[in-house]
Amino acid sequence: MAKVLGIEIGASKIRICEADYKAKNPKVYQSISIKTPEGVVNDGEIFLNDQLITVMRDALQIHKIRTKQIVFSMNSTKIASREIVIPFVKENKISDLIRANASDYFPVDLEQYELGHTILATMENEKGDKQYKVLVLAAPKMMIEGYYQLANAMGCSVAAMDYSGNSIYQAVRNHCGTGVEMVIKVDENSTLITILDNQAISMQRTVAYGVEDAVFTVMNIAALGRQDYDGAVALMREQNVLQEEIEQSLSYLVGGISRVVDYYSRSGGAPIEKAYLTGMGEDFLGLAELISKNTEISLTPLTQMEGLQLDKYFKDASFGEYITCIGAAIAPIGFVGEKESKKGSMDVLPKSQDMDKIAMLVMAGGILIAAVLILTSTLSLQSAQKENKRLKTRIEELQPAKLIQEQYLQQKYTYDKLNYFYNSTITPNEELVEFIEEMEEKMPSSLNVQSFSANLEGVTMSLTVRDKSEAAKLIQQFRSFDSVGSIAVSSIADAGAVMTGQPLEEEPKVSFSITVSYKGYEAISPAAPQPVAEEAETEAEAQAE
């Protein structure tokens, strides 16, 4: 069985796995993790230099790896994605269908992008006709070319290109059975959250935070021995060092995961039945518990996977940080438009004894076809010349339409970009003024506000009123506010609750705390200001709602 090298080039680490290629039950033979040289990768784009080539060549030589075919798994905000629904056609016709309608999915100059796709699910419309739900990707040609140049410099060739989201999906899809399950892949600088419903992707989001801030914090804590980077990672896998300072460095990561889970729930998603933690942070002690506490979903490290022969090779080690490399070797997404020489690099040639027979058949067929073509071309030459003249005239007539299309695409690109930045300036806290004005209009004069604090999500207040009846009316009044989405009440204390016949030492009152969330507060997955990606994200979320 053919082998490939699944390679993921991250900001801090380069990870390589030698595994079976496109196997139903693949086996891993070797895995390597090496430090990424500074300045060679930026948001998935490779900047080729001698140092990068040398460290990767040396790593393969040291581990005596002779496999020359590579599947790169890319992770970049420059790769735009779009979920679409298409007719139920033959699978080998899907690429042609996507290419024909690509300008509707991505309002950019598609000459600069390669397209790829993966089938997410088979559905039925209202009439009972089958349809495909497909994830379509657009990757910059310049980015892809950088990976081909790297492979060539290493003396290798590219078997296929993959996207990290698909790599994760291919690795875990057989492990996740019926029902709704979530896989959280936490790496150095990013976290990929994949929610599957009956083995089909229901939602996939990226949080722009990982565990690297926590690793740096551990490195700088004197009480932990001031470790270097690898030492700090090893320590976090051996001991639960999540003290207050380290948990604070993970707050953005945990908060981002919580917002994605909350958004999924409020968008009508079915309850998540199982959740797994993988990636570099899979075996960081205490991390799964920290995320579970904040999301209220039990999270389990993904220590084994159905359908993959990993137990033998990773018997005493975690495969979490190599999961993307493993998945890339299973079923890479590929990109429409790659050269045939790249696409067919793994094909097996016929045996030599069959070549003579094939050659004779080809020669005989070629002679027959040539005779037919000569006769046909002679008879149709005049007709072809007339058709050629007609088409040239038609092309000239349509030139103004091409110019209008180019102007439209450029204007739409500019509009989407400006709209993105405008929306980025809007925060739910802008509703604070409206909330205070509603309080002034609707709250009773007996209300006493003991404390008041506000953040991007809402307002927390400590309040005092005369009695429980007035407290109940006050809470009901808050629910009628136009600016309020939800409220939570806690810490109720009744100063008038005394034994019968005993005198009151002070005027009766009821004190309680209330947390009000703005109606406009939404969980938003961080994304770079890419017009194509923004449009795809907006439409996917609109459909979910």
Image (cartoon, grey):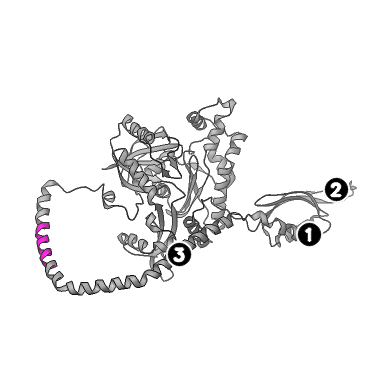
Disc with the residue nearer the chain's start (3 vs 1): 3
Q: Is 480 on the left-hand or right-hand side of 110?
A: right
Q: Are marks 3 and 1 in contact (CB under 8 Å)?
A: no
Instruction: Report the number of numbered marks.
Output: 3
**497 w.r.t. 322: above or below:** below
Which residue, given by chain and number where applicable, does mark 2 sit on?
A: 499
Q: Quadrant of residue 48?
A: top left
Segment tinted magenta in the rendering? 361-372
Residue 71 lies in quadrant: top left
- Identity of the amino acid at label 1? Glu
Can residue 477 be seen from the camera position used here?
Answer: yes
Residue 370 is inside the magenta segment: yes
Q: Position of residue 371 (x, y in %)?
A: 10, 66
What amino acid type is highlighted by mark number 2?
Met
Q: Is residue 373 left or right of residue 499?
A: left
Instruction: Write down the residue under mark 1.
Output: 440
Instruction: Mark 3 vs mark 1: give the one in front.
Output: 3
Nearer-N-terminus badge (3/2): 3
- The residue where tag 3 is placed is 407
- Local SS, label 3: helix
